[in-house]
Image (spheres, coloured by chain):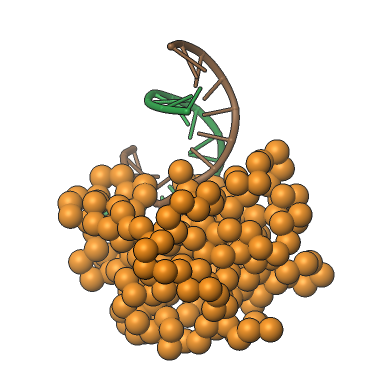
Chain colours: A orange, B green, C brown
DNA sequence: CCGAGGATTATCT
DNA sequence: GATAATCCTCGGA
């Protein structure tokens, strides 16, 4: 069984990590359940410094504090009062930055994912940040856990590298009234033509 | 197929 | 009190 990506992987620029995560395998292992996994096909980078779209744009608060924490840990928060979002913290401790994992292509445990997403087509199982967390049972309970070990049942393994010619970038999704240039900057990465990419 | 609007609640101003 | 790194349903074509 491959080892989780190490802390040094996440201790890089958020932009570098967001690109490098394409093709990696997100793994969810819960006691008494079959292992769930999928290939990461869509990511978004949020840096704190001057990024007016990022939760790390201001001071640390109870919610966004994990973004300042050590790289390789999870940052999970509730969006719109009902959807859990999964991020991986990047860059050195003290620098607020994280990657939002927006979509995966299911590999292992598709049956269980389907059970958790009743009435959905296969494509709808994990083709969006909240769809994915629902299929993988990622909730608040996983906020701040270390994703560089097997301990918490959530980690990322190396996968098949995605070639540069298959990578696309574009504006991040759902930013509302975020001002330019942050609204349109190409900090969303996805695999060209993959049906599991959101929208 | 497509766009509009509602759901639902923690979080921050 | 307003907002939110979203998803789903429904109505119209």
- Residue that appears at 33% across and 65% down: A46
A170 relative to B11 in the view: left or right = left
Q: Position of residue A26 (x, y in %)?
A: 58, 69
Front one among A187 and A143 = A187
- Residue that appears at 31% across and 44% down: A176
**Residue A58, relative to residue A7: is it above or below?**
above
**Residue A70, relative to residue A174: is it above or below?**
below
Q: Residue furthest left?
A: A180
Residue A41 in view, yes or no? yes
Q: Position of residue A64 (x, y in %)?
A: 40, 67
Q: Residue furthest right?
A: A32
A24 relative to A44 in the view: left or right = right
- Residue that appears at 70% across and 72% down: A29
- Residue that appears at 36% across and 58% down: A168
How many dots with numbers? 0
Residue A76 in view, yes or no? no
Front one among A23 and A44 = A23
Quadrant where the N terminus of chain A is found in the figure: bottom right
**Residue A144, relative to residue A41: is it above or below?**
below
Q: Position of residue A137 (x, y in %)?
A: 65, 60
Q: Position of residue A76 (x, y in %)?
A: 50, 64
């Amino acid at each position: 069984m491959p080892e989780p990506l190490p802390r040094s992987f996440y201790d890089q620029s958020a932009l570098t990590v967001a690109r490098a995560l394409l093709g990696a395998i997100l793994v969810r292992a819960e006691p008494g359940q079959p292992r769930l996994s999928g290939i990461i096909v869509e990511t978004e980078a949020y840096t704190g410094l001057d990024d007016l779209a990022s939760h790390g744009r201001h001071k640390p608060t109870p919610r966004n504090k994990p973004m300042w924490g050590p790289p390789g840990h999870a940052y999970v928060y509730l969006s719109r009062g009902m959807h859990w979002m999964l991020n991986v913290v990047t860059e050195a401790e003290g620098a607020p930055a994280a990657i939002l994992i927006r979509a995966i292509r299911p590999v292992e445990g598709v049956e269980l994912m389907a059970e958790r997403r009743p009435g959905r087509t296969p494509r709808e199982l994990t083709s969006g940040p909240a769809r994915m967390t629902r299929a993988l049972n990622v909730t608040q309970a996983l906020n701040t856990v270390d994703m560089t070990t097997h301990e918490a049942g959530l980690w990322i393994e190396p996968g098949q590298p995605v070639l540069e010619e298959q990578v696309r970038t574009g504006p991040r999704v759902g930013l509302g009234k975020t001002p330019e240039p942050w609204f349109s900057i190409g900090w969303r990465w996805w695999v060209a033509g993959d049906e599991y990419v959101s929208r």
